[in-house]
Image (spheres, grey):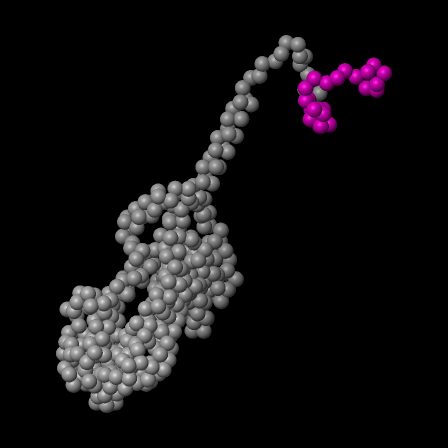
Amino acid sequence: MDTIASLFSFITTPVSWIIVQFHKLYGAVFGPDTGWAWGLSIVSLVVLIRICLIPLFVKQIKSTRNMQALQPKMKAIQERYKNDKQRQSEEMMKLYKETGTNPLSSCLPILAQSPFFFALYHVLSKIASGDTIGVLNQDLVNSAREAHIFGAPIAAKFMDDPGKVEALNASLTDVRIVTAVMIVLMSLSQFFTQRQLMQKNVDLTVKTPYMQQQKMLMYIFPVIFAVMGINFPVGVLVYWLTTNVWTMGQQMYVINQNPTPGSKAQDHYLQRLVKSVTSHGEVRGRRRRAVVQAIVAKGPDRNDNERKFVTALAKAGFTAQADGSVQKVDPATAEAENAAATRRQQPKRQPKAKRQAGGAQQSTAKTSLEKSDEPQDTKPTQAAKPAGGSARQAKTGQRKGQQRPKHPSSKK
């Protein structure tokens, strides 16, 4: 850890300076040696960092949307090269490069926080050992050592021995209870955040490597944090729990206000939009008008959720306009226009395998037809049959070819 700390030593001074500034603010309210003053200073540090990382979060959202838009193409590549995994991976990477999409963009906020995380870890480790670091002088270090959060010092760890915990004026039981609860909350918040993304904001019917990656992260990250959490000081657990809660709330807002097309979240959003239009008779809000405008512009390329939205508007007696507004019309007329527009939609393009199979069948049928049109050589020993006999055979279901002669005594 000393090697890692030395790599991020350039940021320990800014981190310690930010903590000290917030500590001055909260210390004036709660007291300079209290756990509230030092704990809220760490929470404020997280909030400040996450505000600065909002541009990265926006980039992450755009990359996720690009991945969603590419899923049909990715599925087509999987079907085409399902027996050649190497070629499948090459085509996937080529698609990513052509569209400028990075499947690892979902990890950008975590990677950007890593320097601050290790810097804070290094600062708290120095506080636990009583050493000064950055702008933290000896008086501030002693004050931080005396600060307790629910009875646990901010520099104590789950794996600390009893002697080290007693030196911080605390009991090992209190430290382990507080750290265990925070580790569980940290892991659960990470799992819920990823599960919320997988369950509500993606199309689970499309199986792609990206989907498998997200599903894997949903289970791996909480386990990693739970295992590593026993070696984190209480202050670092406060930092990571706060950033998980921030991420969860930020993602919840994005899912509710700007869901991914084709997801469950979009279906719920459009249902709320229909209720709002029905109640007020208009589309309220610039963002909502932009959503309606985009749906109208898609035309026959709308997904199932968007078609349901247009149908629901028609049943309520509204039609969506190109500018994002709605117009009040007779419900029967609106439903008839919507049904006519649905019938005019182009049929979905069949997969390449089906198109090739259909082409092969048409080619076979054409070849058979050409062969049937060719003149057939007749054997000289066979007599030509009258047309009436052929018609009678086809009618009665008798087999073709030379028939056995009837007995003279049989009836004609």
Q: Is residue 235 above or below residue 345?
A: below
Q: Nearer the viewer, residue 290 or 192?
A: 192
Residue 62 shows up from this direction: no
- Relative side of 368 to 193, left or right: right
Residue 203 image offset from top left, x and y in percent: 42, 58
Asked if the stretch drawn in magenta spans residue 303, the answer is no
How would you classify the magenta stretch by its main secondary structure? loop
Q: For the C terminus, which image quadrant?
A: top right
Residue 394 image offset from top left, x and y in percent: 69, 26
Residue beneath the point at 75% across and 17% down: 404
Q: Nearer the viewer, residue 174 or 237?
A: 174
The answer to which image quadrant residue 228 occupies is: bottom left
Asked if the stretch drawn in magenta spans residue 401, the answer is yes
Residue beneath the point at 21% across and 82% down: 22
Residue 146 image offset from top left, x and y in percent: 24, 86
- Relative side of 144 to 224, left or right: left
The answer to which image quadrant residue 29 occupies is: bottom left
Residue beneath the point at 14% across and 76% down: 134
Q: Nearer the viewer, residue 80 or 351?
A: 80
Q: For the N terminus, which image quadrant?
A: bottom left
Q: Nearer the viewer, residue 410 or 282?
A: 410
- Relative side of 102 to 195, left or right: left
Q: Residue furthest right?
A: 409
What are the residue bounds of the magenta stretch? 390-412
